[in-house]
């Protein structure tokens, strides 16, 4: 299968599986499987995970579920860059310190060497029960080392692709500017940009997305609710943005977005979920869900009808960029 064919199979909505790793709160195995079954029944066929998510728990749960499905029927991405190792300081009851409600029997260690990346991928394949992944992302180089990403990690990913262990390679990051630097310098098939091309803000539009179109690099948008501030039409004052309490200026901006959406009979989360797909560089939105109910809500939001007049009014009020800045906008099926 060509890279183009693979990326065409991702669909509009993918499942970002951080919640399967007990992000912020515990989820039992049955709830995890029900969430995945709801996603599958709703037509989701792209699943994104990482060793970082619950110290491997997300990959384990996803692997258990997908082993029941034909391999040709889905696409999966995972990530490298954080190597999981035994925690020799572990004491019974110790919890992970990075936001996942799991016991800290393992620790993460940044490792962008080829040996570390190969070891990380092999461990991921064992947890997933697979012999290869569809997309292999380098995880968060903006948080670790951009020079090592270019000099060591990306060449290692290219060799893994050549060996057939990954069908496509790329980078996942919260930084649009760093992703643009890597797209310009390396031959990447796809990037995952988290939180930087959303209904609330669009810094990826300045350089990253035009560059991806120029270079033929596809884009998966993640973090489209900006850590929760766009997740509810009511937009509470205690909303979160970028994993922290949202500034009052952003709360008010989100409320302005919500009011205009309401005027057009559209829920704010539906507009937020569909907005990134208006740019032709973006192939898919990877959206998390904690439980089958949230998954059902995401599916409904992705299929909600959104009138062109809503986007136009948001443009007129300078809440989103003009259509001209997007280039040719695809007609998306409802």
Image (cartoon, grey):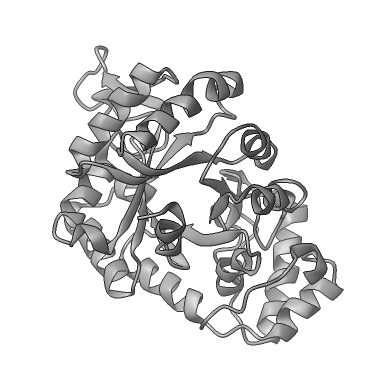
The residue that appears at 56% across and 85% down in the rendered structure is 305
The residue that appears at 55% across and 67% down in the rendered structure is 273
Considering depth in this image, is 1 or 42 the residue closer to the camera?
Answer: 1
Considering depth in this image, is 275 or 216 the residue closer to the camera?
Answer: 216
Q: In the figure, residue 37 lies in which quadrant? A: bottom left
Q: Is residue 177 left or right of residue 108?
A: right
Considering depth in this image, is 116 or 105 the residue closer to the camera?
Answer: 116
Q: Position of residue 321 (x, y in %)?
A: 79, 64
Q: In the figure, residue 101 lies in which quadrant? A: top left
Quadrant occupied by the N terminus: bottom left
The residue that appears at 34% across and 17% down in the rendered structure is 115
Q: Position of residue 96 (x, y in %)?
A: 34, 30
Position of residue 69 relative to residue 303, above or below, is above
Q: Where is residue 324 in the image (x, y as percent from the top left)?
A: 81, 68
Q: How many labels does the image show?
A: 0
Residue furthest top as drawn: 88
Q: Position of residue 187 (x, y in %)?
A: 56, 37
The answer to whether one can see residue 149 in this image is yes
The answer to whether one can see residue 322 in this image is no
Q: In the figure, residue 68 lies in which quadrant? A: bottom left
The residue that appears at 56% across and 43% down in the rendered structure is 243
Q: In this view, does 59 lie to the left or right of 269?
A: left
Position of residue 5 relative to residue 172, above or below, is below
Position of residue 274 relative to residue 204, above or below, is below
Q: In this view, does 151 lie to the left or right of 248?
A: left
């Amino acid at each position: 299968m060509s890279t183009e064919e693979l990326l065409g199979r991702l669909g509009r909505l993918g499942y970002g599986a951080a919640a399967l790793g007990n992000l912020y709160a515990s989820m039992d195995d049955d709830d995890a499987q029900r969430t995945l079954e709801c996603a599958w029944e709703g037509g989701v066929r792209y699943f994104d995970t990482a060793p970082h998510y619950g110290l491997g728990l997300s990959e384990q749960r996803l692997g258990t579920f997908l082993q029941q499905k034909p391999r040709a029927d889905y696409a999966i991405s995972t990530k490298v860059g954080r190597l999981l190792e035994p925690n020799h300081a572990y004491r019974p009851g110790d919890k992970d310190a990075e936001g996942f409600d799991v016991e800290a029997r393992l620790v993460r260690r940044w490792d962008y060497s080829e040996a570390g990346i190969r070891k990380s991928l092999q461990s991921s394949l064992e947890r997933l029960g697979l012999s290869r992944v569809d997309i292999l992302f380098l995880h968060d180089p903006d948080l670790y080392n951009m020079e090592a990403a270019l000099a060591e990690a990306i060449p290692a990913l290219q060799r893994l692709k050549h060996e057939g262990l990954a069908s496509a390679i790329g980078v996942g990051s919260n930084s649009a500017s760093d992703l643009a630097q890597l797209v310009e310098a390396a031959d990447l098939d796809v990037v995952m940009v988290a939180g930087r091309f959303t209904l609330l803000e669009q810094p990826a539009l300045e350089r990253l997305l035009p560059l991806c179109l120029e270079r033929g690099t596809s884009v998966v948008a993640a973090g489209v609710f900006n850590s929760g501030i766009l997740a509810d039409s009511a937009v509470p004052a205690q909303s979160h943005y970028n994993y922290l309490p949202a500034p009052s200026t952003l709360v008010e901006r989100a409320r302005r977005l919500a009011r205009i959406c309401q005027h057009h009979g559209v829920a704010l989360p539906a507009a937020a979920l569909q907005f990134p797909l208006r740019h032709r560089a973006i192939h898919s939105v990877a959206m998390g869900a904690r439980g089958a109910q949230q998954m059902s809500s995401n599916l409904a939001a992705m299929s909600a009808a959104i009138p062109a007049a809503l986007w136009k009014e948001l443009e007129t009020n300078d809440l989103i960029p003009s259509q001209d800045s997007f280039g040719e906008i695809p007609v998306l099926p409802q």
